[in-house]
Amino acid sequence: MGLDMHRLRRAAKASLRSMGDFIWPPRSLLTGLSHGGQGLIPPEDFSRLSFLGGSGCRGCAMPMEADLGDATLCGACAAKPPRWQAARAALQYDDASRKAILDLKRAGRRDGLPVFATWMDMAGRDVLASADLILPVPLHYRRLASRGFNQSGWLAAALSRRTGRPAIMDALVRHKPTPSQGGLTARERRRNVRGAFTLRPSKRDVIEGAHIVLVDDVYTTGATLSACTLALQRGKAASVSILVLARVVRPADITI
């Protein structure tokens, strides 16, 4: 009897989902168009994505022709190593992934978060394995108040739910209301965020000695991530690794 009731409940839930999909067909994360299939990304859209999967330069997640494992470094990282220990990215930021990321960043579309967390977990499995804490890149309180959400915080929370690693949303503070990084050169971006981040005094005890995974939506030039990493290093974090949803590869994609 118990097994029959369980089957009936499952059938009822499946029926409700089918009815819901008929009335409100799923919208593709990548195009925003309704489709008649299952899930948030139809196969024809999914095939357009360029997954980086944690490969490429281990210092900045830039794709490279040859992957030599942990020894893989691009020329820029070999000449000037980044502040953090490692960087991983799930996707290439390009024409295929742009809408999904901008819908998250600007429109607050949250239904793709479990999918994004899965991709980020796959790309950053090695750095997540040794992580004590997951931290998001913070927004200044004025921007947070006007936007109503922090997309990096959403990604960090989704990643925490998937991996079981604890996340702290407010360990880092963006106390300097910097202009948007969009459209700025790498040098301008570094200048823009210099001294913009500090560690919240009440979180110093949990950060000291901890292995941190710092989460953001897009890695562009690394200026913001570097400024956040410096604040964590001043708080005596044992290590900082970067994990992002997408990595800008082409200069033409730098405005996001």
Image (spheres, grey):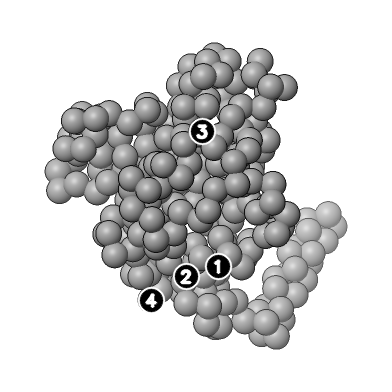
Question: Would residue 202 be seen by someone viewing this image from the given angle?
Answer: yes
Q: CA distance from mark 2 to mark 3?
A: 31 Å
What is the quadrant of the C terminus in the image?
bottom left
Q: Which residue is mark 3?
A: 195
The residue wearing badge 4 is: 44
Place residue 12 in its image quadrant.
bottom right
Mark 2 or 4: the one toward you: 2
Percent across and percent down for residue 253 are 33, 63
Residue mark closest to the camera, 3 vs 4: 3
Badge 3: residue crowd in 10 Å (few <14, some 14–19, many ≥20) = some
79 shown above or below 234: below
Camera-side mark, 2 or 3:
3
Element at label 3: loop
10 Å crowding of disc 2: few (<14), some (14-19), many (20+): some
The CA distance from mark 4 to mark 1 is 20 Å
Badge number at residue 247: none
Q: Secondary structure at mark 1?
A: helix
Q: Which numbered disc, 4 or 1, marks the residue closer to the eye? A: 1
